[in-house]
């Protein structure tokens, strides 16, 4: 049975497989499963596959930092913009692993949507 759009969005938020929406993409921490433990879908299709996730990560970081700059300039209007940038960047550092994980998950979901599975992906 094909998952619905809402099941796909929930699977993305929970970092689950884009095909079955049940298997975990990450084993623990930053260690990824090479294949889905439920449907055996291969997550990394080729060497260098996650280069696209760098663009996603960059976009997420920009959104986070711009939001931080906006909040900082609203809360501290007299503070120099350079200091607000440093504060926003410092606040972003603890979120880097989470952003990296979600960037890879978003990339996997986008890639599987744009270029659906090949038979050899589930051998």
Image: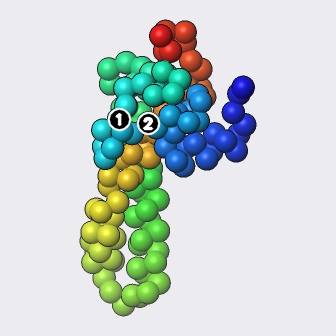
For the point 55% across and 9% down, the residue is: 119
Q: Nearer the viewer, residue 71 or 97?
A: 97
**With 77 as the anchor, is 96 left or right in this view?**
left
Q: Is residue 71 visible?
A: yes
Residue named by callout 1 = 32
Q: Nearer the viewer, residue 48 or 45?
A: 45
Question: Does residue 121 lie above or below 85 as drawn?
Answer: above
Residue named by callout 2 = 25
Q: Secondary structure at mark 2?
A: loop
Q: Quadrant of the N terminus?
A: top right
**With 94 as the anchor, is 42 left or right in this view?**
right
For the point 56% across and 36% down, the residue is: 22
Q: Which mark is residue 74?
A: none
Mark 1, Cα crowd under 10 Å, few <14 / some 14-19 / many 20+, is some
Q: Are marks 1 and 2 in contact (CB under 8 Å)?
A: yes
Q: Secondary structure at mark 1?
A: strand
Toward the front, the furthest residue is 38
Q: Is residue 55 visible?
A: no
Task: Provide residue 99's location: percent of width, then percent of height.
Answer: 39, 52
For the point 27% across and 69% down, the residue is: 90
């Amino acid at each position: 049975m094909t998952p619905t759009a809402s099941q796909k969005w929930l699977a993305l938020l929970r970092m689950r497989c884009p095909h079955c929406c049940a298997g975990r993409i990450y084993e623990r921490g930053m260690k990824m499963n090479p294949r889905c433990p439920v449907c055996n879908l291969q997550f990394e299709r080729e060497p260098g596959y996650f280069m696209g996730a760098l663009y996603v990560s960059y976009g997420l970081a920009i959104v986070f930092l711009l939001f931080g700059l906006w909040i900082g300039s609203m809360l501290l209007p007299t503070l120099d913009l350079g200091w607000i940038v440093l504060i926003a960047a410092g606040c972003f550092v603890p979120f880097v692993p989470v952003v990296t994980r979600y960037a890879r998950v978003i990339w996997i979901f986008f890639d599987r949507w744009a270029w659906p599975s090949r038979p050899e992906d589930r051998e």
